[in-house]
Amino acid sequence: MGKETGTREDGPGGREWARHWRYPQLPGLDLLRAHYVRHTFPRHAHDGYVIAAVTGGIEEIGMPAGTLRAGPGSVVLINPEVPHSARAGEPEGWAYSTLYPSRELITEVAAEIGTLRGTPGFTAEMVLDGQGAKLITDVHRAAETGNALAADTLLRAVVARMLSRHAAPLPARTVARAGGTDAERARAVLEERMAAPPSLEQLATELGTSPFALLRAFRERYGMPPHTWLTDARVRRARRLLDAGAAPAEVAVAVGFTDQPHLNRHFTRIVGVPPGAYRRARAL
């Protein structure tokens, strides 16, 4: 794959590359095709779903229940708001094709196949499914060649395949501890004051609890400490602002990063491409 707009490429001989983009004919979907060697994704979560086909090497995915090792023919399935990390599982890295369908797209396909009631959720985190993995890569290939009919058909086929085989209605989330309410209130404060957040001690005082109790409750509720969650939330908001056409320098200030290099570093770690390349790919 040659270097193209919206692509990051570095390392000896261009061994590491990525393209994160949207195909206008597939609304409600982001696409990422990449080969990573040194890149590691810190713990983060997505607004929507993840359906990823590993096409080469080994990817190690850190999930709440443990670490998965996904090789060629594996399909990784992650539900919205599930914290996870990723890195290479061998020195040569890993290659994969990933679909990021929105909640609305997943719900629409679930309604069309008529086998699920309520909000769908994947019941498996990784499955060996060579045909499903091929469908995912075929969605990318069709989108990259501008074949809208094939891309849409293949997308719905692979989503329906995964939902019919590996999904069930998501259970209503219940907060196990009384501190869960404090965690949700803390999240709301951090979202509202993202550009100038309080310290952990200030936040705990505002909520009438202790820093340690709040930290424990937040980690239990969201799978990461408040500062890690805030960085992830800033990057998510940065993506929305970049999608709307804002310049990276403006976005950095708006979401609370100290400067554009700070945005670049965290954005690249979590999204997999720099904000400038991400924005250019959206403008195509």
Image (spheres, rainbow, N blue to C red):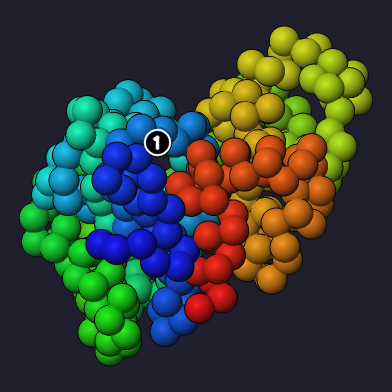
Instruction: Give the crowd class for mark 1: few <14, some 14-19, many >=20 residues within 10 Å.
Output: some
Give the amino acid at mark 1: His
Q: Is residue 159 above or below residue 211?
A: below
Q: Is residue 172 visible?
A: no
Q: Classify 184 as above or below 268.
A: above
Displayed quadrant of residue 238: bottom right
Q: Residue 26 versus residue 95: which sits nearer the camera?
A: 95
Rendered view: 36 above or below 249:
above
Please report the residue visible at 32 percent of the width from the left and 58 percent of the height from the top.
Answer: 33
Question: At which x and y percent is residue 147?
Answer: 28, 86
Measuring from the top left, give residue 69's x and y in whole percent: 21, 31
The residue closer to the viewer here, 49 or 53, is 53
Q: Residue at x 63, y 24 (%)?
A: 225
For the point 72% across and 46% down, the residue is 260
Report the side of 59 relative to 120 (left or right): left
Q: Residue placed farthest to the left in the image? A: 130
